[in-house]
Image: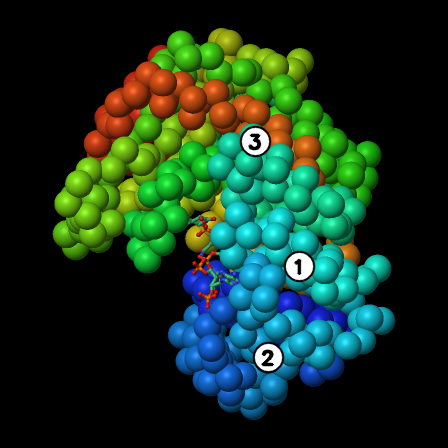
Amino acid sequence: MAHINQIDPFDFVIFGATGDLTMRKLLPAFLRRFHAQEFTADARIVCVARSAHTPEKFRQQVRATLKEFAPETAKDSAVLERFLELVTYVALDATKPESDWTDLKAVLADPSRTRVFYLATAPGLYAPLCAALSTHGLITPLTRVVLEKPIGVDLKTATEINDGVGRFFAEDAIYRIDHYLGKEGVQNLLALRFANPVLEKLWNSDAIAHVQITAAETVGVGTRGAYYDESGAMRDMVQNHLLQVLCMLAMDAPASLSADDLRNEKLKVLNALRPMTPDMVRLNVIRGQYVAGRIDEQKVCGYTEDLGRSRSSHTETFVAIRTKIRTSRWGNTPFYLRTGKRMAAKTTEIVLQLRPQVWSIFSNTPSPGRLVIRIGPEEGVSLVLATKDPGVGGFRVRNADLSMSYEKQFNIAYHDSYERLLLDAVRGNPALFIRRDEVEASWRWIEPILTSWREAQSPLEPYPAGSWGPASTRALLARDGALWHEDMLT
Ligand SMILES: NC(=O)C1=CN([C@@H]2O[C@H](COP(=O)(O)OP(=O)(O)OC[C@H]3O[C@@H](n4cnc5c(N)ncnc54)[C@H](OP(=O)(O)O)[C@@H]3O)[C@@H](O)[C@H]2O)C=CC1
Ligand SMILES: O=C1O[C@H](COP(=O)(O)O)[C@@H](O)[C@H](O)[C@H]1O
């Protein structure tokens, strides 16, 4: 087992503990870290929601959930049962003034322990929840608060949430989570770039013709239709995950790996994104919605049917954006961002397309080569280069792939990104969490696109489930003489 620094006893309180995120992600992540002995049986995981469960009934539900979402770990029943002893449940409507907080206060009696409040509820509850924590005297000097995304639906609401939470917590105690920053492949951008001088020297417009960042999913909206239909792909994925990946990819070297050095560099990228005018939105942004199609030979419904509605929806389930970063490093390189539900494959990846040679001595020239950074589901890196086509008679050049898979190289099982982030919050390491000014800068860039869509009543282009998005997505790159990665492979 890898060397692990065990964490001192802590109290981790999850508001929204009966919800989808807690059940599918947070509790399975804690179980895996407990199994890895990253913390001991002295820790407590206090689950809070309004539903009237007893702690025992709640544990039964958690036991079943863990068997479903962390089966490889939950099959060790001794570990599972010891873990369940750390989990307790408090029924509480956290935003009603008349609610009785006695039980929660009783569990949190020791102010000398690190205390984390994880707000896995609708974002509109974050500020009232923090006010209630303050009223009930639960914020100690060792307390942090973790906020789930999305922080607001636009700049105004994000600012209100940040102000509301900021009344009760100092900025360095506020951990805004973006689970993409917990992914190995995203963190590996730091190592690839700043531990390999040869790559860092190429990391600019002189060598890179364009960059693609894709987060494609085959799933539809599932049980989260009510949330998603209000949000759409731009707020759900682009404003947070895709822009954070873009920042990690495009930023200059931070002075150190400290939280503020990293965040200062990321912020510069967000502020350097070319602002979107309505004309630019029309030319550079595509919004789509899936209709019925096939995925893995199975028929799947369109978005409206997935919502279980007869009336249509104007929410985008796909976005593609062409943008530029106004810096001397990147000014001449288009960046393409793309995300969608019900696409042809589940893949999150970055492609850096290298520039072609200005002159070639070979009669045939293969494609100029590229670096592909796979973030999920299988993590790894491939460098596609030109090589001699083996054989006698003539001299041809073709592309070959130097490929590294994390799993094969390091013999590790994939860890869910929440595992790292939950325990970083307990440890008090905010480097992989988002600072207030980053969130607000992201909204500042996204908002004109949303406004322009609304005001121009932008069309929503249909795409069949199981495809790579609306037909116009190809044209977005064709304008620059470029191809999406999947088209390079055919
Ligand atoms: N699900 C996911 O995959 C992801 C979710 N997120 C974010 O995480 C947050 C939670 O999402 P999700 O789990 O899907 O949402 P759910 O709607 O499934 O869960 C919401 C939870 O909040 C509880 N709750 C609601 N009101 C109160 C209240 N007044 N006091 C105490 N508890 C309350 C609900 O329980 P009860 O009804 O029992 O009170 C429930 O446990 C959201 O901000 C979402 O955007 C972010 C990324 C991914
Ligand atoms: O935050 C979210 O992310 C997931 C995709 O995450 P991944 O780790 O599977 O790539 C997305 O399905 C969800 O809609 C969104 O809220």
Residue 147 visible here? no
For the residues carrying marks 2 and 1, which lies nearer the camera in this image?
1
242 horizontally vs 86: left or right: left
Quarter in which the C terminus is drawn: top left
Disc 2 C-beta below 8 A from ligand 1:
no
Mark 2 surroundings within 10 Å by alpha-carbon count, few (fewer than 14), some (14 through 19), many (20 or more):
many
- Kind of element beneath mark 2: strand
Residue 222 visible here? yes
Residue holding disc 2: 87
- Kind of element beneath mark 1: helix
Residue at 61% x, 86% y is 85
Circles 2 and 1 in contact, beta carbons < 8 Å: no
- Label 2 and label 1: CA atoms lie apart by 22 Å
Residue holding disc 3: 156
Residue holding disc 1: 132
- Label 2 and label 3: CA atoms lie apart by 37 Å
Residue 408 vertical placement versus 150 (above, below)? below
104 horizontally vs 28: left or right: right
Residue 282 vertical placement versus 245 (above, below)? above
Q: Nearer the viewer, residue 213 or 398?
A: 213
Task: Please report whichever mark, 1 or 3, sits nearer to the chain's N-terminal start.
Answer: 1
Task: Please report whichever mark, 2 or 1, sits nearer to the chain's N-terminal start.
Answer: 2
- For badge 1, the amino acid type reads Ala
- For badge 3, the amino acid type reads Lys
